[in-house]
Amino acid sequence: MKVVILAGGYGTRISEESHLKPKPMIDIGDKPMLWHIMKIYAHYGFNDFVICCGYKGYMIKEYFANYYLHQSDVTFDFCGQNKMTIHNNIAEPWKVTLVDTGKDTMTGGRIKRIQPYLGNEPFFLTYGDGVADVDIKKLLAFHCAHGKKATLTAIQPEGRWGTIAVGEDAHVQSFTEKPRGGNSWVNGGFFILQPDIFEYIADDQVSWEGESLKKIAQIGQLKAFQHNGFWHAMDTMRDRVMLEDFWKSGKAPWKVWKD
């Protein structure tokens, strides 16, 4: 199965970094967020990727075009034959298709544009700014078992602030530090989709979340895989710093692969 990653948005909420590069190319540790997401899927044996590029998409293309240079020791011989030699070549077993899906295309439109690269088979889809310790094999088994057109991974994000319960006479009865979700589940990406979902995307201006998913849900063809583990999106600099701290600690929850 192929893995489609949405990587074309402007990333305006993290403009401190995204004015220089696409949000999926912002580093966590010394690797782009996009690399972290791909490593999650590759850990479970899914190595065929289709990347939906848009804003500053040339930077994503240049990264993969020069992937060996990023990962390996290199000798540049300017004295002799003016050649480059790559040492201790470190390569991922990946096939990566990079598709220009337009600078201002909506999320649904981006998905529609990569249809020719997918064939008539189910595929994974996720956002280029979120990591999780989702068990991809269990997600796939869940999708295959229910037989519907689409599966999304539902998560309960951690609250930003702690909550208190206040009783009579203004007595604080309990205090909860940053509760998860409050029984509310939200869309965490990590979709699995049947190829006929393209019927619900008309053109470039269709929002995947605001239109297509709603239509699929209305006809009873959308199921939620409830994930109770780690999930976090990199929307702001605060998020990036938190993910960076996780990585530096050596205990990043989404790092399911081994070095």
Image (tube, rainbow, N blue to C red):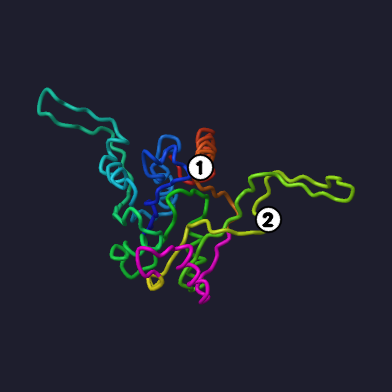
Which mark is drawn over residue 182?
Answer: 2
Dot 1 alpha-carbon crowd within 10 angstroms: few under 14, some 14 to 19, many 20 or more:
some
Q: How many marks?
A: 2
Residue 48 appears in the figure? no
Q: Residue at x 51, y 70 (%)?
A: 222
Judging from the image, what secondary structure is the residue with disc 2 in?
helix
Judging from the image, what secondary structure is the residue with disc 1 in?
loop
Q: Residue at x 45, y 38 (%)?
A: 28
Residue 129 appears in the figure? yes
Name the amino acid type tagged 2: Gly
Q: Which residues are magenta?
A: 201-226
Question: In the image, is 48 to the left or to the right of 43?
Answer: left
Q: Residue at x 32, y 50 (%)?
A: 94
**Residue 3 image offset from top left, x and y in percent:** 38, 57
Assess whether residue 207 is covered by the magenta stretch. Answer: yes
**Residue 235 image offset from top left, x and y in percent:** 50, 46
Name the amino acid type tagged 1: Thr
**Residue 206 image offset from top left, x and y in percent:** 40, 65
**Residue 134 image offset from top left, x and y in percent:** 52, 54
Which mark is drawn over residue 22?
Answer: none
Quadrant location of the C terminus in the rendered image: top left
Q: Nearer the viewer, residue 164 or 19?
A: 19
